[in-house]
Amino acid sequence: MKSPVNALRVLLKAALILVALNLLFAWWNPPIGKLTAYNWLWRGRVRFPYSESPQFYSQDYNVPVIQDFDAMYGAHVISASAKPADEFRVILLGDSATWGGHVTPEHTLASEINRLNLTTCDGRAVKAYDLGYPWPSTVRDLLFLDYANRYDPDMVLWLVTLHSFEKKPADREFLVPHAERMAQVIAEYDLKLPKVYFEEVAEPTFWEKTIIGQREKLKSLILNQVYGLMWTATGIDNANALPQGLPPLPQDVLADVTYFDYQSPDDAPALVRSLMLDVVRVGNEIAGRAPLVVVNEPIYIVSGKNSDLRYNHIYPRWAYDAYRLSLADWMRAQGYPYFDYWDALPSSEFSNDMAHRDNNGEAHLAELLTPVLQEFSCP
């Protein structure tokens, strides 16, 4: 006759096993982000996993894993294999406009560049990779470039705008998980940043390294792998960009010249002084032999009421003009390649966002960038 199961003993054993697993996990701290089914079981993504605005999308097979670069790059097609000998590899850095916030994967700027079938003078195929990520942050982009060097880029296109170079509280969200590497980059390259970027980040506690302490991160990493199946089956990451029927951006803007904490054109010198332009110097040093080309990306320009005061609902004319002049002068003084396409696209080639292009806008910008790509792929 079997002895009855002692429920208390079973629960106690289960609890001890759970504690042991958590202690072992925290002690080992395994690089679980390196475990990926992408690029062998699932096809690699053509842009980084991202999903912060699900209300915009009818289907959304994405989850952000920016806290773990191994997982983020491991899901991307750039990590599929070593660079082919006949490929001229171009990586695109930038914000949501570069990522393709309002277009599907096959119509991102990188995809449109690849559709042009460009070749270098020595016959290599120009292949662009989308390493953009929503929300403008040149400091975050530095870390992206630092990690991407292992994939041997031949050229870097860095798309920027005024907001890219400004100090923002949101930067902390991107940088805290990578505080150790950020501190190393700052020290190694003597990167000049506002004091807030030098604030020490507390080391994770032992508890925070356990399975329970990392449960949110682990959930995201697992979902990222699961969503790879749907991505492979459908080709959808964020379906159809924005749903149809949303109103276009208005051509009228408010009679207001403020820009965040800056109140008027009298504040232009303070705005210019605040721009974190030294990130471009460090970006060039990180890129090494690969030419790094900075591109001021197109913005939506209104033509209606108060358009003499503002370019759009984000940028007053005085602030954006001061930024453009300052960036152009600084780039020229440093001898870095720089191209300004701020007004290159008509308003009809934007979606309902001041920086996000529609399919036509992406194709148009790819064509405009063709001479730049040809110049630096055939030095």
Image (spheres, helix red, strand yellow):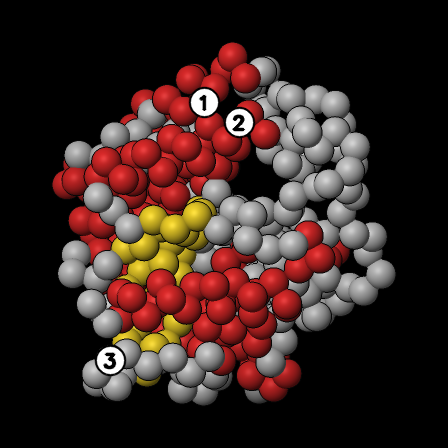
| Residue visible at 75% across and 67% down in the picture | 58
Q: Indicate left or right for 166 with 149 as reference.
A: right
User: In the image, what residue type sits under mark 2?
Assistant: Ala
Q: Earlier in the sequence, mark 2 or mark 3?
A: 3
Mark 1 to mark 3 CA distance (whole Å): 42 Å
Q: Quadrant of the N terminus?
A: bottom right
Relative to 202, say whether 221 is above or below. Answer: below
User: In the image, what residue type sits under mark 1?
Assistant: Leu
Relative to 274, say whether 76 is above or below. Answer: below
Residue 271 is marked as: 1
| Residue visible at 83% across and 52% down in the picture | 247
User: Is label 3 in a helix, a strand or a loop?
Assistant: loop
Q: Residues within 10 Å of mark 3 (few under 14, many from 20)?
A: few
User: Is label 1 in a helix, a strand or a loop?
Assistant: helix
Q: Position of residue 26 (x, y in %)?
A: 32, 53
- Residue placed under numbered mark 3 in the picture: 121
Q: How many marks?
A: 3
Q: Earlier in the sequence, mark 1 or mark 3?
A: 3
Q: Residues within 10 Å of mark 1 (few under 14, many from 20)?
A: some
User: Is label 2 in a helix, a strand or a loop?
Assistant: helix
Q: Position of residue 104 (x, y in %)?
A: 62, 70
User: In the image, what residue type sits under mark 3?
Assistant: Cys
- Do the residues under discs 2 and 1 have CB atoms within 8 angstroms? yes
- Residue placed under numbered mark 2 in the picture: 319
